[in-house]
Image (tube, rainbow, N blue to C red):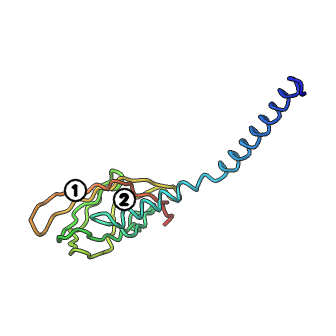
Amino acid sequence: MKKRGQTSTEYLIILAVVVIIALIVVGILSGFPSIGRGTSAKASAAYWASAPIGILSYDLSDTAASNSLIIMNNLPVEIMITLIRIGGVNDNIADTTFQPGEKKTVRLTTFECEADESYSYEIVIRYDNRDTTETDLEFTGDVKLEGKCLDA
């Protein structure tokens, strides 16, 4: 028959081994902080590609002249985009008209981000419905636009 002291010691040794293994696992997993960021950027890109006014591709850099978006009209009506607000910065677009399903590259003239920094921006697109003559409609994405700022 085992003594109580021996059982208590065995229990403490097993507990110590479990704690050490848990610390090792946490140490290994914390060494990969970029895992979550890549996933959220991919989810953001997937959302924006299928949004009513989709952003299929985006190259945002620290130089305003280098920034561009490939936008696609996923609405069943003709629209004219007049403004894009990225992270609170308004960028007036030269009244770009899109037929349903049409995609175009739009250059941004005022927006800049910090080179080599990750970003997460709320996007607001102001547009006119050319079929019903409704003006100043706004589409705000449910998901922020995420990625890494390019060094132009």
Outermost residue, top side? 4
Q: Nearer the viewer, mark 2 or mark 1?
A: 1
* SS label for mark 2: loop
Left or right: 19 as drawn, with respect to 41 = right
What residue is shown at x 84% (from left), y 32% (from top)?
Answer: 10
**Residue located 66% across and 50% down the image:** 29
Residue wearing tag 2: 111
Residue 77, position as x, y percentages in the image: 17, 70
Q: Residues within 10 Å of mark 1 (few under 14, many from 20)?
A: some
Q: Residue at x 67, y 51 (%)?
A: 31
The quadrant of the rendering that contains the N terminus is top right
Q: Using the image, determine if residue 109 lies above or below residue 85.
A: below
Q: Residue furthest left?
A: 133
- Label 2 – label 1 distance at C-alpha: 19 Å
Residue 142: where, in percent of width, then height?
Answer: 33, 53
In the image, is 149 to the left or to the right of 132?
A: right
The amino acid type found where label 1 is placed reads: Glu
- Disc 2 + disc 1, Cβ < 8 Å: no
Image position, residue 64 (x, y; %) = 39, 63
Q: Earlier in the sequence, mark 2 or mark 1?
A: 2
Report the side of 40 relative to 35 (left or right): left
Query: As drawn, which residue projects farthest toward the front?
Result: 1
Q: Secondary structure at mark 1?
A: strand
- Number of marks in the image? 2
Q: Position of residue 75 (x, y in %)?
A: 22, 68
Compared with 116, 107 (above or below) is: below
Q: Amino acid at mark 2?
A: Phe
Q: Is residue 27 above or below residue 37?
A: above
Per the rendering, the mark at residue 138 is 1
- Specify the quadrant of the image occupied by residue 43: bottom left
